Structures are given as C-alpha cells and as structure tokens.
Amino acid sequence: MPRQRRQRINARIPRNRTDHPSQLSNRYYQYATEDAPSRPVSSMRNAPTIPPPAASVDDVPEYSSRSGSPTRPWSPNRATDWTRPPRPPSVSTSHYERADINGSPRPGTPSSRYGGSPRRPLPPAPLFTAPRSTVGEQDTSIDIGDPDDDVFGGGGRTINRHRQHGSVHSFMSESTVIMDEKEAMNKIELGDDDEATEMVDPNLHYGPAPEKQSRRGVRDAQMSKKEVQLINGELILECKIPTILHSFLPRRDDREFTHMRYTAVTCDPDDFTQRGYKLRQQIGTTMRETELFICVTMYNEDEICFTRTMHGVMRNISHLCSRSKSRTWGKDGWKKIVVCVIADGRKKVHPRTLNALAALGVYQEGIAKNVVNQKQVNAHVYEYTTQVSLDSDLKFKGAEKGIVPCQVIFCLKEHNKKKLNSHRWFFNAFGRALQPNICILLDVGTKPSSTALYHLWKAFDQDSNVAGAAGEIKAGKGKGMLGLLNPLVASQNFEYKMSNILDKPLESVFGYITVLPGALSAYRFFALQNDAEGNGPLNQYFKGETLHGKDADVFTANMYLAEDRILCWELVAKREERWVLRFVKSAVGETDVPDNVPEFISQRRRWLNGAFFAAVYSIVNGKQLWKTDHSLPRKILLQIEAVYQFVQLLFTYFGLANFYLAFFFIAGSLTDPKIDPFGHRIGKWIFIILRYACTLVMCLQFIISMGNRPQGAKKLYLSGMIVYSIIMVYTAFCTIYLVVLELIAKTGGKSDLPVSDGLFINIVVSLLSTVGLYFFSSFLYLDPWHMFTSSAQYFALLPSYICTLQVYAFCNTHDVTWGTKGDNVINTDLGTARIINGSIVEVEMPSEQLDIDSGYDAALRNLRDREEVPEPPISENQLQEDYYRAVRTYMVSIWMVANVILAMAVSEVYGVDSGGTNIYLAIILWSVTGLAVIRVIGSTTYAILHVVQKLVEGKAKFDAGNLTYGTGSANSSAVNGSTVQYGGGGTFRDKFTEAKWGMKQQMGKAMFWRK
C-alpha cells in the first residue's frame, strides 16, 4: 500500500535555546547544507515542493507509514488572514472533532494535530505536545505537495521558537531542560523495516503534576497583580459580571446590574457601622429604604437545598411586585427587599453552592483576601442585584418566567462560628446599616410557598403590636409522598401537623409563642432593639455566644441551645412594652426532616434540652410580665399559659414513669384469666416478658446514651425503638380490647366480667381526648389527611419520643457546642531571633562566664534542696468540661431516681388488677384529657378569630369601595353597566371575580383537595 502522510505541519520549540545560537536571528532551522537540497524561501501563499531528503541526513529520523493509517485532511490551526483551500472530494464529507476553547486538539482522537494515532505515535515531548496560546504573523504552515516529502522523514523542518503557555516548559526553567530537540529526536531509532520505535530519555523533566484534571473547553483564570486604592483603609472592589451573564440580562441600565461589589470586612459585626462600612442601599443611585430584610443562613448544604430556598424567595418577591394595588408593593417593590445569604465558614461551605451563587452573579472566585492592611478579614461581603434564578433542577428562570430583580448580599464568614454568630452579622451589622422594618429568617433547605413572605409581612402591617410571627412548617414527604413509607418521616409529619393545628394556634391566642422556628419566622426590627443601657432582646439573644468561664453554667448553656426561645420570651416580657407574637398559618414553608435514627436523635437532643431549660427560665422569670404595658386581660392570659407550660413540664420530667405505669396497669389487666383473650394464661406471660423488656431497654438506654453517639450505636438505638413500638402496639391492643369487652358486657347484660366502670370511663375519656379531638381539630382546619397516613406511625413511635429521645437528651446536657479554637498562639517566653542583615540574627543569651556558672550553680542547688515543683494548673476548658459532666451526672441521677421511685411506689400501692380504683392512673388519664381540651379550645378560638378578622377586612374594603364609588359617581357620568368604577382603582367586575375565586378556593378546601 502506498504510504499516507500528513499534508501540513506546524511545530514549535521553547524560546531562548542556548545550544543553537545561529537560529536566534532566524525563525526556522536551515536544511543540512552538505546533504539536503536547497529550497526557495517559503511563504503562506507560495508553498514550494520539497524534494525527498538524502539518506545521509540524520538531523531528524524518517517516519515510515503503516498500513491502515487514516487519510487526514489539512486543517488550519492559526487564526490568520489566510483562508482554507477547498477540500478534495474524497474528504469533503469527513467530520473531525473540533479543538477546545484554547485552540488545542482534544486528546485521544485520530484528528490530532500532527496525525498521531495509536499505531502511528506522535513525536516525543516536549516539542509537539504543548497547546498553542499565541498567534503571530511569523507562525507559518508549509504545504507538502508530494507525500514522500514529509517533514518528519528528514531534512529541514518548521519550528516555532515561542514559549507556549501551558506547555511542559511553562513549569520549568531553562536550566531544567537538559537536552535540545535534536538530541530528543535522536533517541528515536529506526529498524530495518523503516519503522520508528520511540525511546524517549526517561530523565526528561515534564514539570510538576497538575493539581486537577483540565476540562474540555474550560480555560483556567489567569491572575494578575493590580494596584487598588483602599477606601478608608478597607478593600472595596467593583467587579464586572461575567460576559455570558451580562449578555442575557434584560436590564443593564445601572451599575448594580453590571458590577458585583466586594467588601473585605475586618471588624466585628457589632462595629460594622461604626467603622464606616456601607452597603449599596446606603450609597449613590442605589440608596433606598428597606421594608423587608430576608436572612438565609447556611452551613454545608449542597446546591439543591440552596436553590430550593433561594428560588422560593425569588418567587415571593415576584408575588410582592405583582400586587399593583398595594400601597407598599408594586412594580418596583423589589427595591424595598434585600436578601442576605450568610455562609458559616469559608472552608465549610459547599463548593457547588458557591457555583450556584456564581451562576447568579453574586459570587466570583479569586477576589477575596485573607488580610487587608495588616488586619485579618472576618467576613467577605458580596453585593449584586441579580435578575435570574436557579430552581432546584438547576434550570435558569428569568424575566420570561416572572422573575424580577433581587438585591442580594452574600456574607461569607472566614471562620465557622455557628448560627448565632451568623444572626449577629445579620442583625447587628447589616440590620443596623439598612434599618429595615421587618426581618425574615430562613434556613437553607426550607422552601417557602409563593405567598409565604407576603402573609408574614401582612401580620405586622395589620397589627402594630406584633413583634414576631411564625409560619407553618411542613415536613417534606418526598416525591409522590413516598417519604411517608418511612415510619420516622411519617411520625414527624403527624407531629408537625398537630403542632400547627393545636399548639401554635393556642399560643397565638395567648399572645406568647414559645418558639418562632428559625426555618420560617419574622421579627419587627424596632422591637428587637436594646434600650439606652444596652439591655433588651438582642442583648439576651446574643449572650449565649459570649458566655464563658463561671457564667457558662450548665443551665444557661443548655438554655441557649434554643436561643430563639429566649428571644421570644424577651420580646413579650420587654419592660414598658406590649409586644405579642402571632402564628400565621397561611405562611407555609416546607423543610426536609431526618429520615434516619442517628440524625433524628441528634436533632432532638438540642431541641429537647433547649426547650426544657428555656421553659424553666420563662416560668422562673414570670414576674417580668407585670412590668410590661400589657393590658390586664392579656397578663392574665399569659399567666394561664405559664401554668399550662408548668404542667407540661412536669409531664415531660416524669414521662418515663408515666409511660411505664400506663403500660403496667393497662396491659396488666389482661393477666386475669377471666378476660385473657388468648387463654392458657398467655396474656400473663406476654405481660411479664414485655415488662422486663421495657425495664431492660430503659436501663440500656441510660448506658448507651452516656457513652455512645447515635452515629456509632445506630443498631442499639434502633433495637430499643423497635422494642418500645412492640410494647406500644400491645398496650393499644389491650386498650381497645378492654373497651370492646366492656361495651359488649353492658349491651349483653354480662355484668360478671371483672372490667370495672372506673377503668372503662378513664380509658374511654382518654381515647376521646386524644384521638377524637385530633380528628375534630384536623377536620376543623380542613386538613385531615395526616390522620389517615401518619397517625399509626406516630403512636407506634410515641414511646421512643418519650423515652429514647428524652433519655439521650438528659444524658448529654454536658454536650454544649461552644466552638473550638486551635492552639495557634505563638509563645514568646523563650525570646525570638530577630534578623538583622541577611543570615545574621540577634539573640539574647548569657554573655559572660559568670552568667553561665550561675545557671549551673542554680541547677545543683535545686537538686540538693529538692524544692517542690508546682503542678501545672488545669486549663479553664478542662475545668468547665469536668463541671459540665459532674452536673450532668447529678442531674441524670436525680431524674432517674425520681422516676424509679414514682413507678415503684405507684405499682406497689396499686396492684395489676386495681385499674378501676387506681387514683394515680385516673389522674394521669384525666390530666391528658384536660390538656387536650385546652389545646382544642385554643385552636378553635384561633380559627374563629381568623374568620372574624377576614369578615372585618372584607367589610372595610366593601365600605371603602362604596364610599369611593359614591364620590366618584357624583362627579362622573361614565357608567357602563357592570363595569362601574367600584373604588380603589378596581371595577365591580374585578371585585366580583375576586370574591368568586375566593369562594372556589374555600370550596376546594371543603372537598379536602388540600393535602
């Protein structure tokens, strides 16, 4: 077969070759004068025909072709004025892979630049492997007319002497290159059959290994040094946004759309405004008042969680801008909203979350600095007004989808200092700078509904006494509600639902909600401010971050695990104020819940300990309520709520004993052979086995919780929860069996059965007060589906809520996360060696022989006198940890002994068969009934007040519309039937349509379409 050769070649060499001085004035190497034929000067438009070289030329060995090598057409690889000649018909339909964005051929393809293939190797490195980065007029390609005249076969060749950026030579100096390209090419030996075998010197240096694999079509950013003027000694940069993002922006008329602003903050958040830092909303054409300030806190969540929350916020801003008839919002309503995203730790934030922020134009890599003007940077603040949004599927949404501009502040904290410190940046730094009206707190991962933020804001707009508002948190059920197949997710769904139906409405009626969830809540910024002496809600809220030493006792430390509960109490009990808290059920946010046991137990430890100690704090400091300006009825309601919380606190503290006693008396009733449903005394043996299993699991729970993390003892915790579920299922079976048996006995006349009327009444009342009232409240709020899909899982796991979670929480009261600091302090007690000049240093040492002798004498004297060496003092952190563990041990011991004494005393006083005469069991069951009734009354009152409020608002709008209509009709004669101007800028038809749509929505709820 005839040999097939490449048609064009363009090669390069590193610049500044020292072993070819004759080539410094000429771009190309000359042909060997003794053997190679002469050739005319080549040009791009007049390519000469090169005759085959002589056999004596050994400058570059000849390559021999192999059969099967593909025919490769010529393709230009220089951006010059020369145009490509028409391709021959034989290859006119061929397709070849394009080069990457840097102009280099993509590796591993037969269309490689120099015709390389697996069977025909490329020339050895470093000559022909580097990608091309410069284009100049001296880059020349030479036509090869005859296939025999291959430049790789001998004679002269074209070599580019420019150093190629990104090549192997860009990583090494001139002294590193130990051989020139002629020596490298001579390492190729030719066989008798004229085939080339590559033998590259193994000592040839190719530079360091790359840090990461280069992606196709991606060019690494090239850094350069610039001189930047500091503003008041601080680094503030205005950086252009990426070209691609700029190309499809609908608005480019202001600098806030075309430039991203970076500020390196070197001060504490409390000193942000005093140090002269300003945000875009305080300067220039972007100076604006802020009505709504939204805080989104995140730690290491991925881009899916971030975009879910951020896209939900953008949809809410679009909704606010669509309310054209509002006095506050409207087309330019986005100018009154600022979104602040705070990342807790530069090295903790997820890289792809930064990529999502960069896609929005908010973040740019390579701008932030660690030290500015010899001061350490504490936070990196990026400001940009983005016009695009990323949904959870990572798809861009712009103005065509209704997305409006959004003012974003991204605060990337240099160090991980926990969520409380993030809120201090939000309130004390950015909040003081912007002075907003309403502040909304969100956690990354929470997906607010499209109108959630509006309803939260509306609660403050309607009542000037509202200081805080809580939204409804829904548990994420997964795609197609498949998450409910997990009993842990289903039980949490039921818990969240009943809390939003019973607990939150009751507390809202009282005016004091014990906790505003950080996942979706709002505060009035003015109400949070401290007084002139520095005392107030924010001062108490942030005290948990700065507590140390003797002030950081176990009670205070655990109380500040739920610092949001402290903030709620301080708002309601603020001196000489009358602030209240509200629950806004129409403000809905969906969040993911733990779907595995370790994560679930770890999350509830913080919640339970914080709630318990915060409840104790509010009860102890209840007298503060009488120093407020609340009305007398409000103060009475708050005192009633305090009593209600105290009773719940007692039930929480003695939950272990109450659960054991309820199981003991109800399941023990079936030990009587007369009512044993299984016969042959099987009921008695089942009760004995489950009784000892319950006692054993409780004891094991204490041992496991004292020494094991849930992540390290997952099977042990899971086994205990399974045992508790079995006990609960059997207890529920016994309860239902006793009720049915008593009903049969009463209707059939069989009064000789040993089921007493007292036990029957207690059980029936308790069942109706729990399950029955749960159904009633759920139907009242037109949201009953959780009763059918999640109630069974919740009741099966109820003992685990009472026992497993509470035991682990109390056994880990010493585990308080304060943040750790490494031992990075430089000790200077030995002195320092200071450089004077070059390698000369200045040291302090004994100068005279007398000084040396005195040190020796001191050492001998210490050995002779045997002076007692003082023991090193115990560190403050060690003392604090020992104190925490000791108090934990005392507290757990007292709690355990109290529950054991209660359970043993009641079980000894009342036997297994004394259900009807058991006073303690009756007290427990009727207390549960009473608490449930109070919750239902509060929930019903909330629903009634909500309906009344809607009616009052509707009547006010109707009256305002009539007044406007009457005034307008006296001065206007343009009346056209049903399109009469109705007031407020709307028509009667618009009002009728709006009312009709509201009725349809309520009818939809009545048909249980809402899930």
Image (cartoon, grey):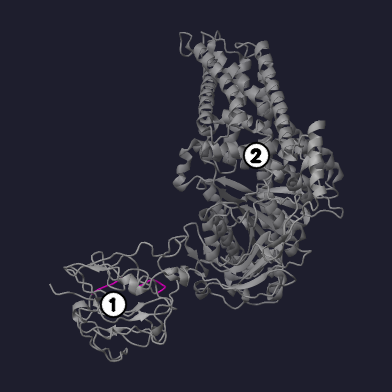
Please name the residue that numbered disc 1 is placed on: 59
Which range is magenta?
94-102
Let me know if residue 352 appears in the view.
Answer: yes
The reply to whether residue 868 is in sight is no
Q: Please name the amino acid that badge 1 sits on.
A: Asp
Q: Is residue 69 above or below residue 51?
A: above
Spot occupied by residue 315 in the image (x, y as percentages of width and height): 56, 61
Q: Amino acid at mark 2?
A: Trp
Specify the principal SS of the magenta part. loop
Q: Quadrant of residue 363?
A: bottom right
Residue 146 as seen in the image, left or right of residue 235: left
Under circle 1, the secondary element is loop
Query: How many tags in the picture?
Result: 2
Residue assigned mark 2: 607
The answer to whether 930 is drawn above or below residue 1004 in the figure is above
Relative to 312, is 54 above or below? Answer: below
Q: Residue 877: x and y, percent?
A: 72, 40
x and y percentages locating residue 671 in the rendered image = 53, 11
